[in-house]
Image: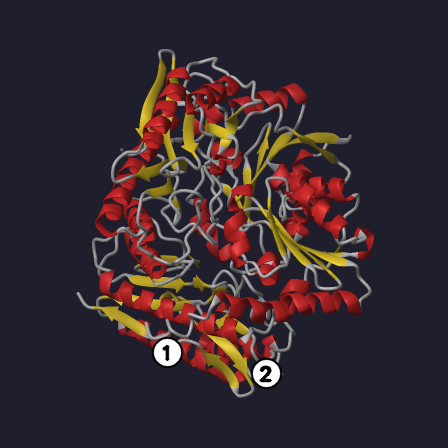
Amino acid sequence: MRTMQPSVTIGSYTWAQDRLPSDEFELRLGDVHAAIERNSWPAVLVYGDVRDHGALAYLSNFIPRVRWGMALLPRSGDPRLLCAMSTRDLPAMRGLTWIADVRSGMGPEWTKAFDPWFEQLKLDRPVELGTLGFDLMAPVLQQAVRHSLGEHFTLRRADDILAIPPQRKRPRELTMMRASCQLVETAADRFVESWRNNGEPETAALDAERLARSLAAQDVRTLISLDGGRRLIPYAGRFEKIAGSLVGYLAVKLAGYWADLFVTVEQRPSAALRHAAGALDAVIAAVKPGARAGDLFATAAEALGPYSLHPVLNGRVGHSIGLSLDEPPHLCAASQTELVENGVYALQVGIAEAEPGNVIVSAIVRNTPSGAEVLVRSPA
Amino acid sequence: MGMGTDMDMGMDQRVVAKKNVRLSAAAKYLANNSRDGLIAASNGLNNFLESNAVYVLSGVRPMGESAVVVDRDGRSTLIVTPAWDAERAASLSWTDHTVATDDLAAELASAVADYHIAVPRSLSVGLSLLGSGVVARIEAALGVLPQAADELARDLARIRTAEELKAAEHATWIAERGYEHLLECARPGMREYELAAELYCFSKKLGAEDNFLLMSASQHNLAVRAAGERILDVGDIILSEITPCYRGQFAQICRTTAIGEPRPVVRDKYAILQDAMRAGLEAGRAGTTVAEVTRAINGVITEAGYGDYCRPPYMRVRGHGLGITSDRPGDIVDSNERVLENGMVFVMHPNQYIPESGYLMCGEPVVVTDQGCRALSAQLAQLDVIPV
């Protein structure tokens, strides 16, 4: 879900070495090094910004709080990280990653920060460097990188040949995802409890946010509806009492990993809510290794009939989730992508313009050989 | 809560007031410079140190990549992503039309065609901040990119309107209430992120739509940073940079708080920062340069014997502009020769690392006047103590 991006993420970030020790990143780098060998690249450059940083976080554990970060992962030698923070902030930034060589990407000399690094990679002929995430990079920054590379290197987009982060979650990632799901469940319960106590969707969302942040969430996103679930909006600061049902959305990020839930609460569960819950059950039941994303969409669409999918879901009934709130594959009609074992997916089903109202429900599941393991589901 | 009534201006009044100022100014600029149109884009990242051109021209804080198209006659269209954000954007925008889409490039091409804008005779703001993938799609849709004029939005909005100044004052009021809340809540044994959660959510409850909040503690700080897992302790100095945003106006206060009575040297050194702040406020008259203000601040700190510390990493800047409307006058540094103008708003903060005390923070949002900079905060920073 697209939500309002805050100017800075305020929660607790660190490199949790007890849960993700350095050998975890050696294992994660395996695919990158294989691609480096196959393509005879001397290195891969990985870019991420404050909103989209899945590849950068997967490989370095570094998550930009503001602006951007970029890692240089060489075939041999030590990796390096450039972050758009001042030199004053570098000691704190060094605590966020296993990469020892962290430099500032701010100040008048920032465009030259990679010069000595590239110098060491030069050969007597032009060579390619692989890139990940460069589609996100602003043109002005790309120009600076290209200037720094000079004629010795050309950039080769590697996003299509290197799926980073992979759809299949690693064992330690599954542990992190379970913790995130537990937190979002706790916060969603508070969302509902607060709503039942005061009838104010924004107060309920804020109560849920406060609880999640107090339990070490790094980031919290909420959307609420003031019109019975017809549309969702970000924080508006109105704190109005609203009659009828509560429809909202809550996402929390814990130790780098996201979990999210839609929340629909009615005084008495309507036929539409039961219908949506049934459609969600059908999608959950269809999850298995090898299931095609498009088939899951078709399953949901059939189960939803005669209702149409809620527009806030953008023509999808879910997607992978992890270091990004919205990872591929997207469960949409045209997708032929197969779901993989130990993939973690947010499954989302909603109905628009039903009588008596609109509903959206969701779950997060792990894909196992015996089907979906539900990690968390919208509160009843 | 006394400012609530003042800020309850109806949307229609605000729409008319802002449309007259920002969109009209943009159209006038285009006409004066024989340009067909303007494409002003935002990446939706809401950087508090930058101007958000879409917000400046539409009044809408976008969730995703977005753009405003303006022609020289003043006709305007806001295009936002995602598609489901249509009604919110339309209800807030003062452009003539609002379109919500999941394909920004295609809708941009459509709006440009509707207004018969010749792209080679047009300007752009903010395209350089979008991801290169999005920019490539826009270039393909338009055939060519307009000439970049990335300073335009921040220049058009460099002077706060009366309404924007009121919003900045209200944001300051929220920041000060937030700091009072910090003084009430902070206690030994609490984790930094727990305190940050309290402060952040408290400011949202008061109406802040965002908050660039840095808050950390140490027995000897090197700088302020985002809250972590550290447990607050007696003898800690809490640094807080509280920056709520209210109706598009960020306002920042910088505060220093001791848990338990601090050593006398901390009070002595903090007084240097307060003197530097007063010197900066006095120097910041309309017509002076940012460099002169910076030198006034640095002069006090140098006179106290810490001239060698008036550089990174012992400090960063002596203040800066505040987005998302306009980040003019830019960073408060001695190389910035920009002339201060009446009505400019920025944060002035002589925050400083001093070896004997560690990093200390002291800062206020200010508005430039003929008599100097006027702090928007009711209470200038002082070294506060949480009794234990």
Identified by mark 2, the residue type is Ala
Q: Secondary structure at mark 1?
A: loop
In the depicted structure, whether residue A28 falls above or below residue B24: above
| Percent position of residue B204, x then y | 36, 58
- Give the quadrant of residue B183: bottom left
Q: Position of residue B163 (x, y in %)?
A: 51, 73
Q: Are marks 2 and 1 in contact (CB under 8 Å)?
A: no
Query: Looking at the picture, does residue B78 appear above or below residue A284?
Result: below
Expressed as whole percent of the image width and height from the top left, the position of residue A5 reads 48, 49
Q: Chain of mark 1?
A: B
* Residue ID at (48%, 23%): A167
In 3D space, how far apart are the residues under numbered discs 2 and 1 (Cα atoms)?
22 Å
| In the displayed structure image, the side of residue A344 where residue B312 appears, left or right | right
- Find residue A301 and name its label: none
Residue B378 marker: 1
Which image quarter is the N terminus of chain B in? bottom left
Q: Residue at x 36, y 63 (%)?
A: B239
Mark 1: give few (<14), some (14-19) or many (20+) Cα within 10 Å.
few
Q: Which residue is mark 2?
A: B286
